[in-house]
Image (tube, rainbow, N blue to C red):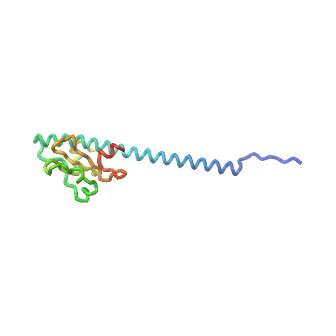
């Protein structure tokens, strides 16, 4: 008696194929989410660098009496606590710094209207404009300042 051999995929081959597909999908999702997070971080850093550049110009204009006031509005004590700004202002006299939050109007006034979020705080160093610091209120992995984010 002669048996006909049917051609087809075995159940084991199908299971192995499905497992391999799931592994590939998992790796792809992980890689994709890492890429998205890195892109978001780079966007935040770019915005903060732009704001810092404009903040330096504002301090220089303020020091040369070209403008009457620094750009921004007061921040709350809760926002100060989130950012740990007290550590950053140690060693500075009260008349040597100013901490202000930039609104969308402030950003637009500084030709930064492409930055839509109102989550940026500037620590103006009136003694040394190059030492101005920019903070992001939402933070990124527990880091809030431009200096911290540049190290990531």
Give the percent coordinates (x, y) of residue 116: 29, 48
Taking depth in this image into account, of 21 and 148 the one nearest to the observer is 148
Give the percent coordinates (x, y) of residue 47: 30, 44
- Most distant residue in the left direction: 65
Taking depth in this image into account, of 145 and 25 the one nearest to the observer is 145
Number of labels in the image equals: 0
- Report the quarter where the C terminus lies: top left
Relative to 29, is 83 on the left or the right? left
Relative to 30, is 78 on the left or the right? left
Residue at 12% from the left image edge and 42% from the top image edge: 63
Residue at 27% from the left image edge and 54% from the top image edge: 84
Quarter of the rendering containing residue 114 = top left
Residue at 70% from the left image edge and 51% from the top image edge: 11
- Most distant residue in the right direction: 1
Residue at 26% from the left image edge and 47% from the top image edge: 134
- Most distant residue in the bottom direction: 78
Give the percent coordinates (x, y) of residue 136: 29, 50
Give the percent coordinates (x, y) of residue 71: 18, 47
């Amino acid at each position: 008696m002669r048996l006909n051999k049917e051609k087809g995929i075995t159940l084991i081959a199908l299971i192995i194929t499905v497992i391999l597909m799931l592994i590939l999908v998992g790796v792809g999702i992980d890689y994709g989410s890492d890429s998205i997070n890195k892109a978001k971080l780079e966007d935040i850093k770019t915005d903060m660098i732009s704001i810092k550049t404009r903040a330096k110009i504002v301090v220089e204009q303020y020091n040369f009496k070209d403008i009457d006031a620094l750009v921004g509005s007061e921040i709350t004590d809760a926002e100060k606590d989130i950012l740990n700004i007290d550590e950053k202002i140690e060693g500075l006299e009260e008349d040597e710094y100013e901490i202000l939050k930039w609104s969308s109007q402030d950003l637009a006034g500084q030709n930064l209207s492409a930055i839509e979020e109102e989550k940026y705080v500037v620590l103006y160093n009136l003694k040394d404009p190059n030492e101005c610091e920019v903070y992001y209120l939402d933070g990124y992995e527990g880091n809030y300042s431009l200096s911290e984010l540049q190290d990531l």
